[in-house]
Image: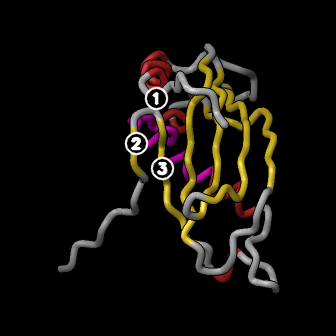
Amino acid sequence: MVTLPEPHSGTLDGPLHLFAVRAYYEDTDLSGVVYHANYLRWFERARSDLLRLLDIDQRKAVEDGEGAYAVADMQIRYLRPAKLDDAVVIETRCTALGAASCKMYQRALRGGELLADAYLRVGFVAPDGRPRRQPAPWREAFKSVLSQESPA
């Protein structure tokens, strides 16, 4: 029996998480340009895989009734279009850590060219939707990748 490879979760480079994606036909509009909402999907995948690399088990937290992370606010800029078949790297850095939330900066790059970037705050919320302190081990995991460097 053939053992299939696991999906790649990206790479940690110090406090920076790097996650590679490719622009597929389904990501584009009729002109072959990546539809704007797909950057949100790529950013979400990168954040989810960053948590996985930090051993933060979101699924277990939800199943155990502890809560989940939710994007509380986001500011995104679109600077240049990604196009069909482009290789894009999503960079994620944690810029601030609070008791119940984490601020992050993400950017999408094709080579060295900045395509889009986003500033966001992700909050940990209880099943009833109210803010809740992040589990202590998760805060410690975030501290390990907390960036001392200001985003560009």
Disc number placed over residue 145 in the picture, else none: 1
CB within 8 Å, label 3 to label 1: no
Classify residue 35 by image quadrant: bottom right
Alpha carbon separation for disc pair 2 and 1: 9 Å
Q: Amino acid at mark 3?
A: Leu
Disc number placed over residue 12 in the picture, else none: 2
- Name the residue tied to disc 3: 18
Classify residue 52 by image quadrant: top left
CB within 8 Å, label 2 to label 1: yes
* Residue at the extreme front: 112
Q: Specify the principal SS of the magenta part.
A: helix
Q: Quadrant of the N terminus?
A: bottom left
Few, some or many C-alpha atoms within 10 Å of disc 3 (few <14, some 14-19, many ≥20)? many
* Residue at the extreme bottom: 30
The residue tagged with tag 1: helix, strand or loop?
A: loop
Q: Amino acid at mark 1?
A: Val
- Judge whether 63 appears above or below 149 on screen: below
Few, some or many C-alpha atoms within 10 Å of disc 1 (few <14, some 14-19, many ≥20)? many
Q: Which residues are magenta?
A: 44-59
Q: Quadrant of the C terminus?
A: top right
Determine if the magenta segment contains residue 111.
no
The image position of residue 63, as x and y in percent, is 52, 38
Few, some or many C-alpha atoms within 10 Å of disc 2 (few <14, some 14-19, many ≥20)? some
The image position of residue 126, as x and y in percent, is 66, 25
Alpha carbon separation for disc pair 3 and 2: 6 Å
In this rendering, position of residue 14 left or right of residue 18:
left
CB within 8 Å, label 3 to label 2: yes
The image position of residue 34, as x and y in percent, is 73, 72
Q: Amino acid at mark 2?
A: Leu
